[in-house]
Amino acid sequence: GIARMGLEVTTEQQATLLDYLALLHKWNEVYNLTAIRQPEQMVSGHLLDSLAVLPHLWPQRWLDVGCGAGLPGLVLAVMRPEWSFTLLDSNSKKTGFVQQAVIELGLRNVEVCCERVELWQTAQKFDGIISRAFAEAGDFVRLTCHLLADAGHWAAMKGAPEQELARLPEGVAVEKVIT
């Protein structure tokens, strides 16, 4: 899958990504972090899905809203160690797992926060805000606009975005849709 996407992934990054999936599989048995249970299915359903967005992202400071079990934020942090990632979720069970994964994987470019996005504040805004399964696109934009830098952009990972894009708040322009 990585080769088909044309991504350059070092042997060390591949090992770290597989270590992450092993942690996810282990914790998922107790904490029910994801509906996908089989490690082989996690590779395509979580890992490759998260990697697919990578060529379309830009540096530097990223917020993953509704990060759940750390997808796509942890995967992106492994691939772009020079970028900064904040992973935000209101579920302490999930952020507890993500924090443990950050420690075990040795990721120095990740901060984990357990808070509702509409209540959360930060001094430094984000260059990009991404979400894989947080909310409908319009709600995603409305709930996170206070966290986006003036020149920042959103990246919403959606399966079928057409209807959601039609309901975006007025004044929000869509630069491109990648399928």
Image: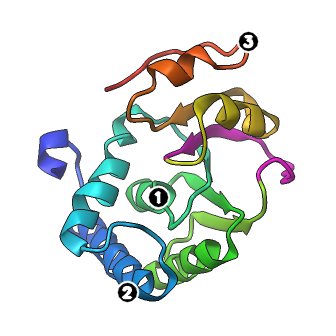
Q: Which mark is residue 71?
A: 1
Separation of marks 3 and 1 at Cα, in angstroms: 29 Å
Separation of marks 3 and 2 at Cα, in angstroms: 44 Å
| Residue 88: % across, % down | 67, 59
Query: Which structural element holds mark 2?
Result: helix
Q: Earlier in the sequence, mark 2 or mark 1?
A: 2
Dominant SS in magenta: loop
Camera sees residue 146: yes
Query: Which structural element holds mark 3?
Result: loop
In the image, residue 108 sits, relative to residue 79, either above or below, namely below
Stretch of the chain drawn in magenta: 117-132
The answer to whether marks 3 and 2 mark residues whose Cβ atoms lie closer than 8 Å is no
Left or right of 126 in this view: 81 = left
How many neighbours does mark 3 have within 10 angstroms: few (below 14), some (14-19), or many (20 or more)?
Answer: few
| Residue 107: % across, % down | 51, 72
Q: Select label 3 or label 1 by which is in front.
A: 3
Q: Quadrant of residue 87?
A: bottom right
How many neighbours does mark 2 have within 10 angstroms: few (below 14), some (14-19), or many (20 or more)?
Answer: few
Question: Which residue corresponds to mark 2?
Answer: 26
How many neighbours does mark 1 have within 10 angstroms: few (below 14), some (14-19), or many (20 or more)?
Answer: many
The answer to whether marks 3 and 1 mark residues whose Cβ atoms lie closer than 8 Å is no
